[in-house]
Amino acid sequence: GEDVEQSLFLSVREGDSSVINCTYTDSSSTYLYWYKQEPGAGLQLLTYIFSNMDMKQDQRLTVLLNKKDKHLSLRIADTQTGDSAIYFCAESKISGGYNKLIFGAGTRLAVHP
Amino acid sequence: DTAVSQTPKYLVTQMGNDKSIKCEQNLGHDTMYWYKQDSKKFLKIMFSYNNKELIINETVPNRFSPKSPDKAHLNLHINSLELGDSAVYFCASSQILTGQGQYFGPGTRLTVT
């Protein structure tokens, strides 16, 4: 997506941490989201963060938000083969008085033994 | 099961035909969406309905016509199908004022030959 940018690929060894980065453009975004898409499946909402937070932790997932730089990251601790998927970052944007999500192009995470 | 469901999962058809995709959610959400995901996995919103009212209508050919008979259902009808319509179409739903993210269906893979 033109408003949300992510690197396209990330390869990590099983057991290591993965960090997926995202930059967005709309400083008025109130929520930012991370979604996971496994092959042949829909998008699964992993976690989201409200724009007045710097960090959110949920089990193996840690989301960091740097509002000044409009930078969002997702850290997956102890990465497993089941974490192999495409991860999408999304920002909420106001359109006609309603929020819509703008997605990044997705980061393909490959976990190898 | 509590979910967003779509039918059919696969749709193969010839150019010029008219086809419909159906979506239903039983999450009690008031807003539903149609997204198109292209072969590069880029995800773009097409339409959104809030309580049966169209609220987001992106630049989509008017061959595409959404219909929401009630807030739990959103259908997509496509007239005069073209090769470029081949994609995966995802339905999603959310509760619009909460910001807690959108929940996606499993997708409909449309192939136009």
Image: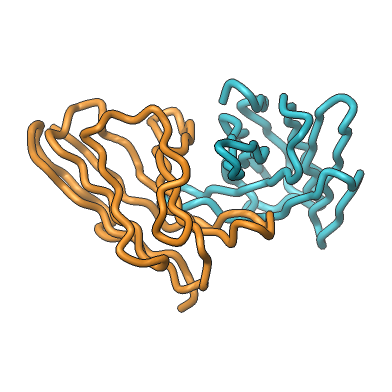
Q: Nearer the viewer, residue B72 or A23?
A: B72
Q: Quadrant of residue A11?
A: top right
Residue occupying the point 25% across, 58% down: B8
Q: Colour of chain A?
A: cyan
Q: Position of residue B20 (x, y in %)?
A: 20, 51
Q: What is the basis of the colouring in this image?
A: by chain
Q: Colour of chain B?
A: orange
Residue A66 shows in this picture: yes
Q: Position of residue B17 (x, y in %)?
A: 8, 39
- In the displayed structure, B71 sits above or below B90; it is below
Q: Position of residue B105 (x, y in %)?
A: 43, 58
Residue occupying the point 17% across, 35% down: B112
Residue occupying the point 72% across, 54% down: A47
Left or right of A25? Residue B54 is left
Q: Residue furthest bottom?
A: B1
Residue occupying the point 39% across, 32% down: B38
Q: Quadrant of residue B64?
A: top left
